[in-house]
Amino acid sequence: MLDKLKSDLDQVRTMSIVGMCKNAGKTTVLNWILSEVQRGKCMALTSIGRDGESTDVVTGTEKPSIFVPSGTLIATPAICCGCVT
């Protein structure tokens, strides 16, 4: 099943990962895609959420890290959020 998903994702040029609640698995899916599916491809990531904090501002729980491959382009509203120092 994962091989089929990897094959299908190889055909995708643009993707959004959306969840309607906290702890829906968005970060887990993103990390899997970054580590397994997109090897050797030029990628860009963007976020409209709060980024950079280690503790969730709503729940007070630890947030999972995102492991971004070298060479990935990233756009995030760091100045607006005040999260990145």
Image (cartoon, helix red, strand yellow):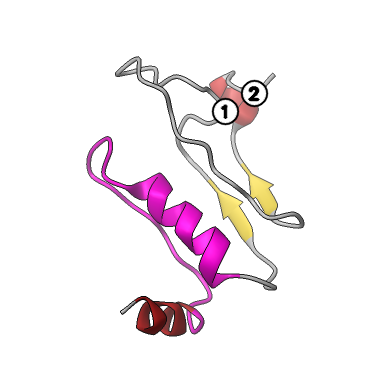
Instruction: State the residue at coordinates (75%, 54%).
Output: 70
Viewed as shown, does residue 14 lie left or right of 24? Answer: right
Disc on the earlier residue, 1 or 2: 1
Circle 1 Cα neighbour tier, 10 Å, few/some/many (<14 / 14–19 / ≥20)? some
Residue where numbered disc 2 is placed: 84
**Residue 13 coordinates in the image, percent (x, y):** 53, 75
Check if mark 1's residue and mark 2's residue have beta carbons within 8 Å: yes
Q: Please give the residue where the numbered disc 1 appears in the rendered image.
A: 52
Image position of 69 (left or right of 64)? right
**Position of the N terminus by quadrant:** bottom left
Location of residue 63 in the rendering, given as x and y in whole percent from the top left corner: 43, 29
**Across the whole image, how many numbered discs are drawn on residues?**
2
Which element type, helix, strand or loop, lies under badge 1?
loop
How far across and how far down the image is residue 55, in percent?
A: 45, 19
Q: Which mark is residue 26?
A: none
Look at the image and say whether residue 34 sits in the magenta stretch: yes
